[in-house]
Amino acid sequence: MSERFNIHSQLEHLQMKYIGTGHPDITRYEWVVNHHRDSAASYIGHPHMLLMFGIAENESIGRVRYRLLQQMVAPCGKAPKEDDEEEEDDE
């Protein structure tokens, strides 16, 4: 029983410490946005990944970096309307 409690407390600690690990109430859209931003940040942080993308797309490393930075602003488009807001508007 104590092992199960320990795992739960460790998971809660990670979720509070790191934004990208999510929480029980995270929406699918928020999770995907975090995933895309984390991936783009990792690609930008590793020059060899930028070089590989640049070669594959026949673009310069600077253009690939710029495109990834622009995608981090809204990686999945506009956020969908939440169900709670729609229910309040109907009433």
Image (tube, rainbow, N blue to C red):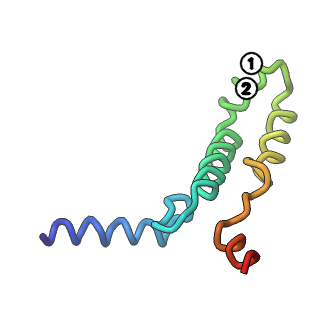
**Mark number for residue 29?**
none
Question: Looking at the picture, does residue 69 appear above or below residue 89?
Answer: above
Residue placed under numbered mark 1 in the picture: 56
Q: Give percent across and percent down for residue 38.
A: 62, 49
Q: Give percent across and percent down for residue 46.
A: 65, 38
In the visual, does 9 lie left or right of 22? left
Which of the 4 image quarters holds residue 2?
A: bottom left
Question: Looking at the picture, does residue 83 appear above or below residue 59?
Answer: below
Q: Give percent across and percent down for residue 48.
A: 66, 29
Label 2 sits on what residue type?
Answer: Phe
Which of the 4 image quarters holds residue 49?
A: top right
Q: Residue at x 42, y 66 (%)?
A: 14
Residue that protrudes farthest toward the front in the picture: 91
- Quarter of the image where the C terminus is located: bottom right
Residue placed under numbered mark 2 in the picture: 53
Query: Could you say whether the residue bearing mark 2 is in a helix, strand or loop?
Result: helix
Q: Residues within 10 Å of mark 2 (few under 14, many from 20)?
A: some
Q: Residues within 10 Å of mark 1 (few under 14, many from 20)?
A: few
Give the alpha-carbon distance from disc 2 to disc 1, as whole Å.
Answer: 5 Å
Question: Is 88 or 21 nearer to us in this picture?
Answer: 88
Question: Is 27 or 10 nearer to us in this picture?
Answer: 27
**Callout 2–callout 1 Cβ contact below 8 Å:** yes
Question: Looking at the picture, does residue 31 appear above or below residue 57?
Answer: below
Which of the 4 image quarters holds residue 43?
A: top right
- Quarter of the image where the N terminus is located: bottom left
Q: Residue at x 67, y 50 (%)?
A: 37
Label 1 sits on what residue type?
Answer: Ala
Q: Residue at x 80, y 47 (%)?
A: 69
